[in-house]
Image (cartoon, grey):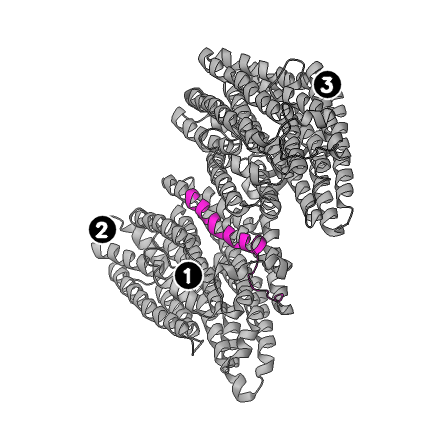
Amino acid sequence: MKGLLIISALGIIAMLAEIFKFKKLLLPIVLMGIVAAYAFNFMEWNTSMSISYFDNMIAFDKMGIAFSGIILATAFFWFILANDYFEEDTNTVDHFALVLFALVGALMLTSFKNMTTLFLGIEIMSIPLYVLAASKKKDLKSNEAGFKYLIMGSFASAFLLFGIALVYGATGTFDIMQIRTYISANSQSLPLFFNAGIVMILVAMCFKVSAAPFHFWAPDVYQGSPTLITALMSTVVKTAAFAAFLRLFMVGFAGVSEMWTGILAIVVALSLIIANFSAAMQNSVKRMLAFSSISHAAFMLMVILANVRSNLSVNALIYYSLAYSFGSIAAFGIIYNVTRNGNENTDAFNGLAKRNPAMAFCMAVAMLSLAGIPITSGFFAKYFVFTAMIATPYKWLLILAVITSAVGAYYYLKVIIAMYFKTQEVETETIQVEKSQTLVIVLTTVVTLVIGVVPGLVADMFRF
Amino acid sequence: MLTLLLITFPLLAALILFLAKSKASKTLALSLALVEFIISLVAFYLYKHNPDSCIFWFDVAWVQSLGIHFNIAINGMSLLMVLLTTFLVPLIILSSFKNEYAKEYNFYGLIFIMQMALIGVFTADDGFLFYVFWELALIPIYFICLVWGGENRGAITFKFFVYTLFGSLFMLVGLIYLYNHTNVDGLKSWAVNDLYAAGRSLTETQQSAVFWLIFIAFAIKMPIFPLHTWQPNTYVNAPTQGTMLLSGIMLKMGTFGVIKWLLPVVPLGLEKWGATAIGLSVIGIVYASCIAIVQKDYKRLIAYSSIAHVGLISAGILSANQQGIQGAIMQMLAHGVSVIGLFLIADILFRHTGTRDVDKLGGIRSMNGNFAVLFLVVVLGAVALPLTNGFVGEFLLINGIYQFNAWAAAFAGLTVILGAVYMLRSYQHIMLGERKDSQIAFGSLASSDKWVLYIVCFVIVAFGVYPKPLNDIAEESVKQLMLNLK
């Protein structure tokens, strides 16, 4: 809870920076603030089980703290990576504030106890992102991205709200624990519109995590937005949305799981197929990663689908989010540097192994991790999902996941082949990466490898 | 502890090579590989005296909550495979002395990473660890083929990587399925014996599913017809040393995997589908042999002959009797040695004459008689003439398959005849007859090449005449295994 308050305060400080003229100091302040939030967050680890705030609207239990930890850590690295994004533009301070407020929303999503908090969290997180997506003001594609994201996002929010209203109508409460008890007490006499409500919420959440067939906004938005904002969307936002998804369906609606798991299974299957085959056909790396993020969403949805042994599911999702976030931060950091000249196609990576061997190596690790090859963390992420899924009746999804994973290897390797095998037609100078960015990229790569070799660091976190 | 040393030393060697970036990487790599070979010889010696010694065994928890252990151990069969690996790697490095590779320290470093992963595969006693090493072996060979390979390497290594990854993931699902059925005092376990027990507790249908999930991975690696389509192109386009690693050692991962991780796990599945799998193997033998006969490119010819050989090995293993499996182990060793000799010969031909086309070569014997003799010994080893090391294995294999089914043995036996046809005919074309235009002069061999061929020929003859030390270990370990199969 203190973490959430600190980040909110940081957002307000950021807005004051322009008036009181400490713009230069803002980045260090924000970084220190995030570290402080992170520390306070984990100080609650052992004492948190029973504390809830605001009349049980929000409560940081272990699961919430773990997801908040991932979000804050990712955000920390993101801010270092993004420091020149803030320098370039005139509205530095607004951008800071917007990102911080999006973070506030993300933290709320990890720990809501009440569906109103869920809605508030999603809106607080999304609205700054609509603006940020369009923050390259003179770029047509960026504007398109922001606009598309806004329209589609609002549409999904409306679904969510309608769904919440219907569930409220059926159960008489917004509190997810009370919904849970109500469901188990009245499982036979739930009205039909309760089901409709859950399906609408499901659709809205699938929108937010960009699962097929509700994914159409993702490729355009990912491609059009400034690369660093895309990085933010595919890491922090995704983690938060999944934390919310998991809590809502695992805690709130677990009692009626037989009605939504079937729908979710179809969503997962479609996401796997559409995302992987579309990704294989992309030339633009950013667009490829957009589709790949849909495929990763499908994997994370499988965890929610598996649901049976909650312990395992929570662990699997936390590990997956961590592995995916860190892999993506490294990948997007490198993409940001490589595509500075405007060429966002795979051939921009040609000969990177010669132009900047260290970055090529980090990119190779990131790609192998996303593809799920041992000993990177991405492999264990997939492994945990498989382990969770093998006990469910949806074993056919596993086979599908295996087949599409092989397709996935195809497009990740395309980047590696470009880096190590192809050469630039035009002679280009070596790519210089700023020191702070190099640090972030190397650190995230190291983490990817370390938790890949010693997955117990994260995987043994929950032992109830 | 000794097993751990066998795994960590190559890793250390790789790090030394990567970091030193020495100009003398070749010599450095060779000496490091020889040290590793000596360690494995020590292991062999100690094993002969006390096979149950605790130095062969190492076990620490890796991920406690999931029952994953870093558990490695050496038994008879894995010792033979480790010996094969540590013996072939120095030969492979020595055979590269005449090739110039850019950034060779990386090249040799990757070979050592590969060696580490291979030894890991052969010694892992934990299902999960086995899978990790299995996948890990793919990464260095992928980069070796990609960076130092031939013309069309991009597309071809790609196919290779995706193909094998595809199979491996199925195996992972199969293994997780088994893991999910283990029960050791209420906990799940990845230990090999617990997986065996879990596999046996399944119904026939479940076992059949697991059989195919796991078998696909091994079949792709070996490769078995009809999953072989990645192999010829990859072999031809990889750098010679990459091809040697692929065919000499990596192929054995598949056959070894079937023996240790498939046969004892799903006996009912094997009973139901073993015949089908043997059928595929035998089809592969005949099919690949026929293609080999009409091949013009010598390297490609060896690639197809390798499919034929491995088909025989796999049929022998799947017949699941003492002779079949023992023969398979012996043949795995023999094939590893002779195929390295053959690929080196293909490389020598190419370096001296600029072509590997059988039709364009001829009459080399008149220019270099020494080479002709060495070549002949390797060829005879490959066609399994009595008193060469190939004979013991092939004899036992066909015997084993015969016990399973006489018809299968009859078709599998064709490999002897067809093998003699393409091997001897290509030898005749290349070495005998008239000199052709393409080679102006076929000078004397480089000393490094000569030494590799000497050693290969020595091993072919020595273990053909006196296979007892290896055969004893193989026999003993297969007896142990047969207890598990019953």
Q: Quadrant of residue B364?
A: top right
Question: Picture coordinates of residue B164 (x, y %)?
Answer: 51, 39
Q: Amino acid at mark 3?
A: Ala
- Label number found at residue B462: 3
Residue, disc 2? A189
Residue B282 lies, with reference to residue B443, above or below; the image says above
Q: Amino acid at mark 1?
A: Ala
Q: Nearer the viewer, mark 2 or mark 3?
A: 3
Disc 2 packing (10 Å; few <14; some 14–19; many ≥20): few
Residues at discs 1 and 3 both on one chain? no
Tell me the subunit letter for badge 1. Answer: A
Residue, disc 1? A241
Residues at discs 2 and 3 both on one chain? no
Tell me the subunit letter for badge 3. Answer: B
Q: Quadrant of residue A142?
A: bottom left
Residue B480 lies, with reference to residue B348, above or below; the image says above
Instruction: Name the secondary structure under disc 3.
Output: helix
Question: Picture coordinates of residue A167 (x, y %)?
Answer: 27, 60
Give the number of marks: 3
Q: Amino acid at mark 2?
A: Ser
Give whichever of discs 2 and 1 has the lower sequence position. Answer: 2
- Magenta-highlighted residues: A402-431
Q: Is residue A411 magenta?
A: yes
Left or right? Give the position of A95 relative to A434.
Answer: left
